[in-house]
Image: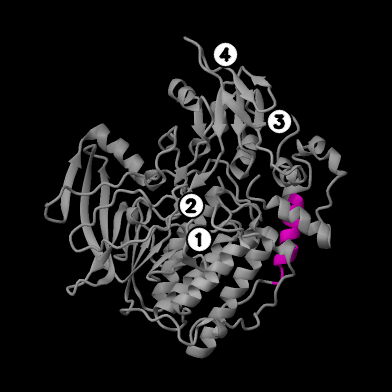
Amino acid sequence: MHILNLLSFACALAAPCIAAIQSPFTTKERGEDEGYNFKYPIRKVAIVGAGPSGLIAYRELTEVSLQVRVFERDNVPGGNWHYTEDPPRDAPVPNAPVSLADFVPSLPPPGVVLPYSEIYENGEGEDEWRYFRGPSPVWESLKSNAPAPLQQIPDFPWPAGTQWELTQRQLQSYMRAFASLHGANSNDDNPSFAYNTRVELIEKRLNDAGEEEGWRLWLKELVPDLASGKTRATWWTEEFDAVIVASGRYNAPYMPDIPGLAEWKARFSHQLAHSRSYRRPESLDNKTVLIVGAQTSGAEISRDINKHAKQVLQSIKAHPDEHKDISAVGLLARLPRNTTIVPEIKQFLPLEDGSTLESSKIELVNGTILTGIDHIIFATGYRYSYPFLPQYYNESVYVPREGASDKAVPFIALSGEYLRDLHLDLFYIRDPTLAFLSITFRMQTFTYCGYQSLALAKVWTGTAKLPDTDTMWEMYDDLVKERGGIGKTLPYLGPGQHEGMRRRYIGWLNEAANKYGGKQIDGVPKYTDEVGRYWWAAQYGVPLNGEESALSAYMAGFGGLDLFAEGESQQNIIDALWDVDW
C-alpha cells in the first residue's frame, strides 16, 4: 500500500529545481486555437470524496463561483487520513471483480418514490455502517514518507517549527483544519457537503431531446442512531453538469494469485490478512510473522512490529532483470538487520486434516519450505475500483435507469491497474465533464492535486482551453508511448515524467491566466531540492535507531551506495528505486 506515493520527493533529485515562476509552456501548436467546445455550460459540479484531493478541488472550484456538492461516505473529512481502530472487512481470496472490489452498490427497489428510506435493526446496521464507510488502511503509528515542507497544500503551510516527520494524527488534524478553514468540516453544517453519503451510481443523463447532457448521481445516506441501535438508510438522486472522482486509490485490496492461498484463507481467515487491516503491533507480540511484499506498507509494517514479534520474515518478489535488484535499496534500508528476507512464495502447500497455520508449509521459489508461521500479512497493494461507474468496465452488467444514456465506452482496466483515455491523467477525453483526481503514482499528492484542481476550475469556467478532441488523442498517444504502452506502467510517473507533467500544468495554466485572467501558479519552491536530498539521506541512508539495516548484507555486492551521487549514477539509482515491477 502506498498511503502517500513512495519517494515522491525524489523527483527533486532527478532534475534541477525549476525557477520560482515557470517559463510559458505553449500548446497552441497542439490544437488549442480551435479548442474543445463543451455542449453545455458547466455550473454544477459533484465531487466524489472529501479526502485531500476532494477538499482541494472544492477550494479551487468554489473560488471561481462554481456550485459544488461533495459526497463523502465517511462521517468526517480527510479520506485515508481518518484513522479509526475499526478494521475494514477481510480482503477476499480470490479477489472480487475489480468493478465491485471496493463495495457492492446498493440501489433502492425499482419503482419506489424518492427519497426512499429503510431502517436497519441493531447489529445488522452496525456491520452495514462499517462496510459502508470503508475504514481507511492507516495504522496507529504510521508516519508520512514525505517531509512536511513537501507534504502540504499550496497556500496552507504547516506552522513554523513543525518537524519534518509527520504522524498520521498530525495529518488527520491538518486535513480537518483545512476543511474547517473552508467551512467544510462535518460539524460546519455546510449544505455543499453530504457526509455519511455514498455515491452508488453515476449515469450520463439524457435531456428532453434525448441528448446526453450532464450526470445523474444515485446517492445513499447511512446514519446510525447510537441511542436506539438502529441505522437509517435513505436513497435519492441529484443532477450535475460535471463530476470529479476523488475517491482515492486504496479502496480495493489486491491479494496475489498464489496456488493454495484460497484454501489457507478459508481455514485460517483470522491469521491471514491484507495490510489494510493492520492497526497495532501489540496483536503480534511474540509471534512469527511473514510479510508478503516490501513496498511502502510492507517495509513500514515490518519496521513497526519488529520489537514485538518473535521473528519477522519478509517475502520479496525479485525483479526479472537481476541488475534491477538495486531497486530494493530504498525500502530494505528501513528494515532492521534481524529481519529475515526470503524469496517469493511459490505455493501454499495442501493442508492436512486438523493442521494449524503453525504446522502448515509454504514453498518458496528457491525450494525452501517455511513452517512455524503464526501470522501472514499481505502487503500486496491495491487496484482502482469505481463501483459507481459500472458502464465503463468491460464485462460489467450495467442496465441504465430511466432517463440515462446507454452509450458508454469502457476505459477502466478489468485488472484494476490503470485507467485509459485521460487527457493529462485528468479529463476523460470522450467527455471532459468527467474527471479523475490524483490517480497517478509517484507524485506529491497535495501539490499536484492543486494543479489539477485549478485546471478543472479554469477549463470548466472558460478561463483555460482544452485542445480539440483529435489533439487530445494525439497527446494521449504520446503519453502512452512515453510510459511504456497501455498497461500497469501507465499511471506511474518516473522522476523525469513527474517533472514534465508538472511543468506542463504550470506552463499551460499560467499562459491561460495571462490570456484570460485568473489565478497563476508559482513554480516549485527553491528549497525543494535541498529538503528532498536531506530527507532521502535521513530516511533511507542511515542505520535504523543506530542498528545496521537488512540492506547492509544485501548491498554488499554493490560496493555500497552513495545517496548523493551525481549525474548518471544518481539517475540509475533513482530509476531503479521507482521501478514499478519491483
- Which labelled disc corresponds to residue 339? 3
Of callouts 4 and 1, the N-terminal one: 4
In the image, which residues are magenta?
526-538
- Which labelled disc corresponds to residue 438? 1
Mark 2: which secondary structure? loop
Residue 78: percent from left, percent from top:
45, 55
Between circles 3 and 1, the one closer to the viewer is 1
Between circles 2 and 3, the one closer to the viewer is 2
Mark 3: which secondary structure? loop
Residue plotted at (77% across, 45% down): 323
The single residue placed furthest to the bottom in the displayed view is: 515
Neighbor class of circle 4 (other Cα within 10 Å; few <14, some 14-19, many 20+) is some
The reply to whether discs 1 and 2 touch (Cβ–Cβ < 8 Å) is yes
Of callouts 3 and 1, the N-terminal one: 3
Residue 342: percent from left, percent from top:
69, 29
Please identify the quarter of the rendering in which residue 406 is found. bottom left
